[in-house]
Image: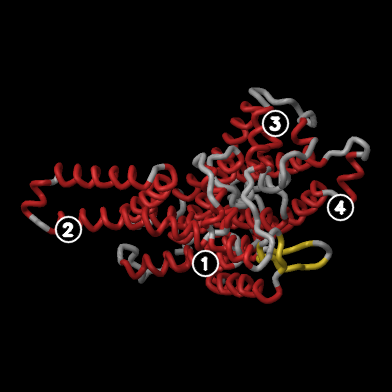
Amino acid sequence: MSTYQNRSISKGIDWVTVWLYAFILAVGIMCIFMVEYNSDQPWLSSFLTGQTNYSKQLLFAGICVVVATFILLSDSKLYTAFANLLYAFGILLMLATFVIGKSINGSKSWIPLGGGFNLQPAELCKIFAALALAKYMSRQDIDFTKISSQIVAGAIAMLPAVLSVAQNETGLALVYAAFFIVMYREGLPGWILVVGFSFGALVVATLVLQPLTLFIALTLFAGAVVYFNIKKIKRRLSYLFFIIFVWLTCVGISVFAVPYIFNNVFQCYQSQRIYSMVGKDYDCSQNKAAQTAESENRVVIKPDDYNVRQSKIAIGSGGLFGRGFLKGTQTRGKYVPEQHTDFIFTSLGEAFGFVGCFVFLLIYFFLLLRIVNMAERQRSTFSRVYAYSVASILFLHIAVNVCMTIGLFPIVGIPLPLMSYGGSSLLTFTILIFILIRLDADRNMVLR
């Protein structure tokens, strides 16, 4: 008999990760219950009706248990064999949304399945992109120090992101940047990440500082770099030209590129959300999309930071130890919009306070640490790259969502993993994690 015929489902399984997954999932259902609890309705029967979001989430959790069990019983070689095919399938699903997609909250990224359920291909494509990237980077003929290999890997990660932007799902598109963390682990030059972070810092500085102040600051910085590298510049004049080129690029980005993007590419409300993150107000009269809408007598989506303000109030009202289970006034009063989805963290903050949030984030930290440890003990490049992909996706989701609810990041519609309501999101994270657990259980096999 083969190895797989003799396999027990528990053999080699990292049960610590499974229990961390189950605990976070249970806390998520509890938080959704706190948001929607109605004292006039028997809570036990309401869990069984399928009419409330927490009862639907419980149903989604049951489906995920079945899917997780199936994955644990599957052959790990399937994921290497079908990685590229699954990626192509995911891209086709995302393209299908432009034809048969359903618009929800201004985003045409959902495929209706009937019975009130919808599928969001951009969520599932994170799994397929992780598998495809792992498959590509594990090929024996790939030298990841070559620029051509880095470009192909970047294209695999960014194609779903481009389609997400076209679907008006900028939040999900942002998640695909997590794959660059994986590529850095596998040998992507550090200067690329430095350029990326520097660009982000320059954009923030452009929003915060006056144009003249920023110009002077950039000029003084460039002058300081020239002064401290004067000996190198005397030996090679090309250093001076490079410094001037970087200075001109930074000035051009701050003076022309950033204002153009905010006024001509982003919607008015998107620009306002980013400006509000740094404590600034955005003038929608400068926004081309808003001007076009007004000229055509269409409704303009006005900027409003109501969500963030109410989120801060809800979390702040929890204090150090929280108001207690089902005792949150902001949660029970439904003051926070989308509290069962993108702002689910507020219910946790109000009920259990700073201490509860800190403990819960520690659970997330232990899960991420466990996944990184699993990644480092893999014997195959495929499994290691996939494991780091899972860790990076989870980290970006957690960091952005939590920062979003406390006003440190603009609202971009990213769910909190295993916590936020939604079948597509829950199924995606379940499949991501349990494929990793299956690969880890078979780490002694040669998967390449």
Tag 3's secondary structure?
A: helix
* Badge 2 vs badge 3, beta-carbon distance below 8 Å: no
Residue 127 in sight here: no
Placement of 100 over or under 362, stated as above or below: below
CA gap, disc 4 to disc 3? Answer: 26 Å
Q: Nearer the viewer, residue 447 or 268?
A: 268
- Residue drawn 69% across the image and 28% down it: 352
- The answer to which of marks 4 and 2 sits earlier in the sequence is 4
Question: Mark 1 or mark 4: which comes first in sequence?
Answer: 4
Does 420 appear above or below 346?
A: below
The amino acid pointed to by label 2 is Phe
Left or right of residue 151: residue 249: left
Where disc 2 sits, the SS reads helix
User: Please, what secondary structure does the residue beneath circle 4 have?
Assistant: loop
Which residue does the image show at 21% across and 53% down from the upper left? 243
- Pinpoint residue 445: horizontal percent, then vertical percent: 50, 60
Question: What residue is shown with label 3?
Answer: 350
Q: Is residue 285 left or right of residue 256?
A: right
Residue with the mark numbered 4: 50
- Residue drawn 41% across and 50% down? 203
Which image quarter holds the C terminus? bottom left
